[in-house]
Amino acid sequence: MRAYSYYPGCSLHGTAKEYDQSLKLVAGTLGIELKEIPDWNCCGATAAHSTDEALGLALPARNLALAAAEDRPLLAPCAMCFNRLRVTQHELQDSAKRHMVEALLGESDLTVSGIQEVVVPSLLDVLDNDEMRARVTEAVVRPLAGLKVVCYYGCLLVRPAEILKPDSLENPQAMDRLTENLGAEVLDWPFKTECCGGSLAIARTDIVLTLVHRLLSMARNVGADCIVTACPMCHSNLDTRQTQIAAEFGESFELPIFYVTELMGLAFGLSPKELLLNMHVMDTKRATECIGKEPAAVTG
Amino acid sequence: MARIGVFVCHCGSNIANTVDVEQVADIAGQAPDVVFSTDYMFMCSEPGQNLIQEAIREHNLDRVVVAACSPTMHFRTFSGAIQRAGLNPYMLEMANIREQCSWVHADKAVGTDKSVDIVTMAVGKTRWFEPLFPQEIGVTRRALVIGGGIAGIQAALDIADSGVEVVLVERSPSIGGKMAQLDKTFPTLDCSGCILTPRMTEVVQHSNITLHTWSEVQEVRGFVGNFEVDILHKPRYVDATLCTGCGECLARCPWQKIPSEFDEGMGTRPAIYRPFPQAVPNVPVIDAEQCVAIKSLVEDPEREKPKCGVCLKFCPRDAIDFRQQPTVTTEEFGAIVLANGYSLFDPTAYGEYGYGRYPDVITSIQMERLMNAAGPTDGEVRRPSDGKHPRSIVFLACVGSRDERMGRPYCSKICCMYTAKHAIMLKEHDPDVQSYVFYIDVRAGGKGYEEFVRRAQEEYGTCYLRGRVSKVYPEGNHLVVMGEDTLMGMPVRVEADLVVLATGVQPQPDAGDVARILGISYDSYGFINESHPKLNPVESNTAGIFLAGSTIGPKDIPESVSQASAAAAKVLGLLSQPSLLGEAMTALVDRSRCAGCFACEDICPYQAIERVTLGYGRQAAEVNEGLCKGCGLCVSACLGKVITLRGFSDQALLEELNVLLLEPESA
């Protein structure tokens, strides 16, 4: 059993409920114990750090302080939450910023003293290691043979590189390895870490539409049946904007967008219903129907 | 009684602005044993030196203090001056009131007070001076040149032409260096091989040059005029004395598909190979890691016959020897020229450019091989992915140059020029080619250089786009280059058949090791430091070791060649002397009191401490004056305090302190 403190953040309780659900089911199969930290708060996302530096750091710092008391690594499956936690740890190495945050935390009993000791892995760090790879291989009962996927990491899992130190800024491999292990055919494509527009979805929808259109076109051009992601923000932009893109660019994609944990769940034999795939805007059947089509790959 | 003269320099306004030089001369004039004191505008000028010499004669001075700049600047100037007036050149002390005083103070009163202290301390020290006499050292009239690129070739030829014996050591199988890989040279577009290969042949035919290729300098001992160098000769597995260079083995080798280093991976070579057809010497070498025969012998040294052995069978001269072993020879030299060149930045560091991921993203040196008539495509430019002739070609300048993110903030100097050359040559090859160059600034300082770039733009229609590229990715049958045009203030997108990365110049990966072997210093990037960037540009800071070419920093061919000739002139100047004067300020062991602990031996960075056995078997340390640099480390390390440093006796140093610390009481 591997135990993690679990920080779902707002999206996994809202728009990305299926991410939360699929992760919990998959974690159970893999022997990963998730203990939700008590009384967690919003990470501040883009809104806080782009308007108020102190608040942008204090919000994740409070969650880190809560996790420090638990003495377990802190898993935040949302790429944005993960990113803010790690950036905050980095920024708070600076004593002036620490004082700024301490002033905001002032009233509570929480302190920033232990937050540098909290280990904050990304979900991909948790799943992509020798031990987990072996367990995943063991857990696969329904290989995803015949399914062509492209892995989309987005920016939040890799940038800023000085802080997150990814294996590659342009061509990361963790999700590719993981998905390949599930039996899917992973296609190489050049837009693994291109921007999806992020939270500009609200203020400048036009930019998001342009960027997502580029991503979808490229994914389709390389022959993907679906896109896999580990970020609720990316998922939301890619999954929910396709109708608008069809109207804007006169091009219909209807490309299913999966969380990596959903594909794991499918390979582990869970049903689309259990995995809440019905919550997606784009029908996932187009992709799930591809599974097992190629006879050579059915044995597995 | 000493008779000391003090000479205070204004250095124009450099010193006089923040130091009251007249007052300093006045006060120094009252110090004990000072019989003459004055100030002058430029003491280093001819009238300044005359003034000192006249004062020496007129006042019968036996010691001189010059209060001016740093001794590294002008000690030799003034010691020469006093020597010409009949004094021992070491009866001089430089009181540095410029670098350590006037330049760092703004307040004239402070500067003046401090100058008085510095000058009077120097006067006190001088009272304990004794004449010093450097040893005469013999000179070995042979030169070693390390590196067989164009700089090393030029240096070796220039030295050898003057009748001095030269050994040229090159670590690859052939001389020629980077220049041998190039197609044309900017801005005249002469064929690189055509101007280089005659020089290479000249080297191997020269009666005064011994060429060791596939060899490396392993260790350097000794000092100027008397270096002793260990040279490692790697096994070639081909007996050079038997081989005629017929090339039969190259064609017969069954292992033909090894990526060619010389072709930068654009072509292949056999396991027994010469890097290129005009290689000098024309003797192949066997790649031990790829050769089945050698591998079989390494696995089982006892086996009678190696596997494969095709080359052995077909060699008409029986020159193949799979069991050759490395050898080391030791040779003596009077001077060394380091010309080990540069390497190119590895562009995989820029993941966004896709080098190594997309076959049609190549480097400029790979482009040279594609354009070269003797290259893997016989000079026909075909892109690696499908062999098609590229029509739209995008160049990215400053890949690994002027980029702090990559630890390469400096300009590589040659990339703007070779990129313009590529754009011109590609259009010459195929008039339908359209080239684009993404650049930061075009740096074309040099004779005919700016005009050359202009030609690339105006006559050859190359499209220059000022800005960086953010991403290169494949789309269908071509590459898409996303960048910024900072002059238009707009993002741009160019579709390319081929993308060429102008990779920057960086030191050889082992530059630091080479510098340590030679005992010379290098900068934070690994480029070797010149003794003085302006006035001693081809000297290292170790006497007798000279520098040429891009080991010092990025350089083009004309600059490397000029430097090589300059280094050769310096070598010839040194070796033309019948003997050299050694260091006079050396350490001296009082053997009668030496306990033989040899703490000095451990600490000496120059291996200058020798062990001598005295009568009754007593061991004592002795200083080899030829090796001693007078650093003084042994003096501090000596437990019995029996080592003194000539020119820095305890009395002299204590007197300096006395002057400083006892001054208030005496005043």
Image: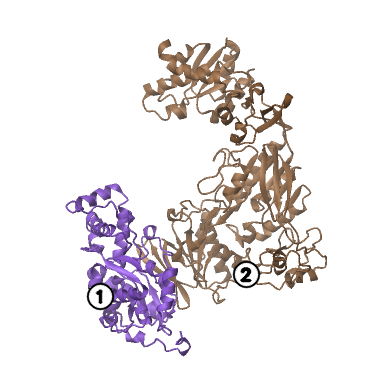
Chain colours: A purple, B brown
* Residue that badge 1 annotates: A17
B394 relative to B281 in the view: left or right? left
Q: Chain of mark 2?
A: B
Please give the label number shown on residue B267.
2
Q: Is residue B620 above or below residue B197?
A: above
B311 or B198: nearer the eye? Answer: B311
List x then y, in percent, for residue B8.
Answer: 49, 20
Give the quarter of the image for residue B630: top right
Nearest to the eye among marks 1 and 2: give it.
1
Mark 1–mark 2 Cα distance, whole angstroms, equals 54 Å
Q: Residue furthest right?
A: B317
Quadrant of the rendering where the N terminus of chain B is positioned: top right
Quadrant of the rendering where the C terminus of chain B is positioned: top left
Question: Residue at position x 71%, y 73% from top?
Answer: B254
Question: Residue at position x 43%, y 85% from top?
Answer: A146
Question: Residue at position x 62%, y 69% from top?
Answer: B267
Please give the label number shown on residue B629.
none
List x then y, in percent, for residue A225.
Answer: 38, 83
Find numbered disc 1 in the image and state the secondary structure of the residue it sits on. helix
Find numbered disc 2 in the image and state the secondary structure of the residue it sits on. loop
Residues at circles 1 and 2 in contact by the CB criterion of under 8 Å: no
